[in-house]
Each structure stands twice: as structure tokens, then as C-alpha cells.
């Protein structure tokens, strides 16, 4: 895996201990006041998933609290 990958201005850092790329964006909220990922970051994560899939790497995007978006490598 590469160390860092930048897509659309968002830099995803590879976490080798957890087999995932991660990037932190702004904390955003939906109409029900639930945390949601920053729209541009979420789209960049989708592009990263596509890029990795094209390289034969199975992965999926997820988001957690405090603006974090992860692209998890499926083992």
C-alpha cells in the first residue's frame, strides 16, 4: 500500500495497523442533527475506493464521528 494518497485536495493517510486510509474533514450535520461526512471528502473517498478496486484491492468507505472518513481494505 502507498503511504498517502491525495484526491481532490483531500489527503488520505494509510494506517497500516488497521488496514485503512483515513482523512478528517469538517464535522457536518444532517437535518436530524446526526453527524455526516463532509460532502467533498465523501466523494473523494468514493474515488479512492474506485482507484483501489481498479488495482484489484477490495475495499469500502465508511465514516465515523468528528469528521473522519475511512477507506477500509477488506482482507
Image (cartoon, helix red, strand yellow):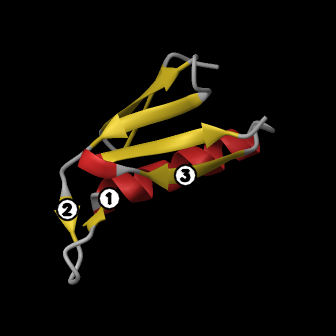
Query: Mark 2 packing: few (<14 Cα in 10 Å), some, or many (20+)?
Result: some
Query: Mark 1 packing: few (<14 Cα in 10 Å), some, or many (20+)?
Result: many
Instruction: Indicate which disc, 1 or 2, sits on the residue closer to the N terminus.
Output: 2
* Residue at 47% from the left image edge and 49% from the top image edge: 45
Q: Quadrant of the N terminus?
A: top right
SS for dot 1: loop
Marks 3 and 2 sit apart, C-alpha to C-alpha, by 17 Å
| Percent position of residue 15, x then y | 51, 21
> Which residue is identified by label 1?
37
Q: Is residue 69 left or right of residue 33?
A: right
SS for dot 3: strand
Query: Mark 3 packing: few (<14 Cα in 10 Å), some, or many (20+)?
Result: some
> Which residue is identified by label 3?
61
| Percent position of residue 44, x then y | 42, 50
Toward which corner of the image does residue 57 lie, by quadrant?
top right
| Percent position of residue 23, x then y | 36, 36
Toward which corner of the image does residue 32 lie, by quadrant?
bottom left
Q: Quadrant of the C terminus?
A: top right
> Which residue is identified by label 2?
28
Instruction: Indicate which disc, 3 or 2, sits on the residue closer to the N terminus.
Output: 2
State whether residue 30 is above or below residue 3.
Answer: below
Amino acid at each position: 500500500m502507498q503511504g498517502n494518497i491525495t484526491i481532490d485536495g483531500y489527503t488520505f493517510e494509510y494506517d497500516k495497523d488497521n488496514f485503512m486510509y483515513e482523512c478528517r474533514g469538517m464535522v457536518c450535520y444532517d437535518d436530524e442533527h446526526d453527524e455526516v461526512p463532509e460532502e467533498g471528502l465523501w466523494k473523494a473517498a468514493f474515488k479512492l475506493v474506485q482507484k483501489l478496486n481498479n488495482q484489484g484491492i477490495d475495499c469500502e468507505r465508511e465514516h465515523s464521528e468528528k469528521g473522519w472518513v475511512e477507506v477500509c481494505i477488506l482482507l
